[in-house]
Image (spheres, coloured by chain):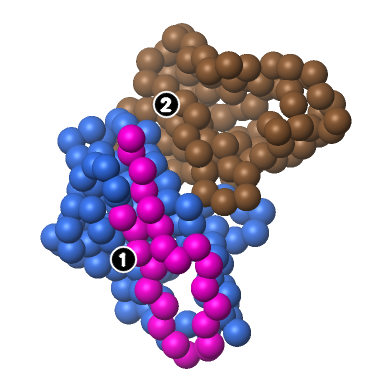
Chain colours: A blue, B brown
Amino acid sequence: GAVVSQHPSWVICKSGTSVKIECRSLDFQATTMFWYRQFPKQSLMLMATSNEGSKATYEQGVEKDKFLINHASLTLSTLTVTSAHPEDSSFYICSASRTGTPNYGYTFGSGTRLTVV
Amino acid sequence: EDKVVQSPLSLVVHEGDTVTLNCSYEVTNFRSLLWYKQEKKAPTFLFMLTSSGIEKKSGRLSSILDKKELFSILNITATQTGDSAVYLCAVPRNTGGFKTIFGAGTRLFVKA
């Protein structure tokens, strides 16, 4: 149980275009999902916390208008990188925790490697 | 400021060796500490620790938490090349939502 599906696994896009990444909890409801970014050989950096039915909470330094997060249902959150630039190239990972169990270990999606050319 | 510090940052051992990875934390509203293994893609969950002194074990891996001294260790016995990975320590922080703070990770390389 507790599977999180992230799509796509990798994407290459042109500078200036937008890319949408989906994160789905397949067998549980996720009130809260998290979006992380990871640069090579570095740890995960939290970008934003996504709550179902409300606005996402962004970490300091993360541009809200650039990284649009939508959490329309208890099983789906999306991250859209708008007007992507080469410096946005990174590994993006989502994670989710089960509703009502805040101490439960978080389940991660498989990640999306974004390359902006 | 909340932080999670792991040591060592990298480690090279030979197959069969035993390794101990360290994680210290200073996090408000502490509830649990998580260990993950990250190979090429997303991290995979290893352990969640909530109580001091109770060892969690899974095969050759084990972990324990000390809430008084604010640290945890992850032990791997009889290491194998497949154990080569980055091991991440993370502490969720309840801030009215849940924010997880990750350590920088320990990069373990097991030589054949």
Instruction: Write down the region rendered in magenta.
Output: A1-24
What residue is disc 2 on? B48
- Tell me the amino acid under the disc marked 2: Met
Chain of the residue that carries numbered disc 1 in the rendered image: A
Q: Position of residue B55 (x, y in %)?
A: 49, 11
Q: Dot 2, crowdedness within 10 Å: few (<14), some or many (≥20)?
A: many
Q: Quadrant of residue B15?
A: top right
SS for callout 1: strand
Q: Dot 1, crowdedness within 10 Å: few (<14), some or many (≥20)?
A: many
Asked if the magenta segment contains residue A16, the reply would be yes
The residue nearer to you, when weighing A38 against A30, is A30
**Which label sits on residue A78?**
1
- Left or right: B100 with respect to A49? right
Asked if the magenta segment contains residue A78, the reply would be no
The residue nearer to you, when weighing A54 against A116, is A116
Instruction: Indicate which label's residue lies in the foreground, 2 or 1.
Output: 1
Quadrant of image for the N terminus of chain A: top left
Res. B93 in view: no
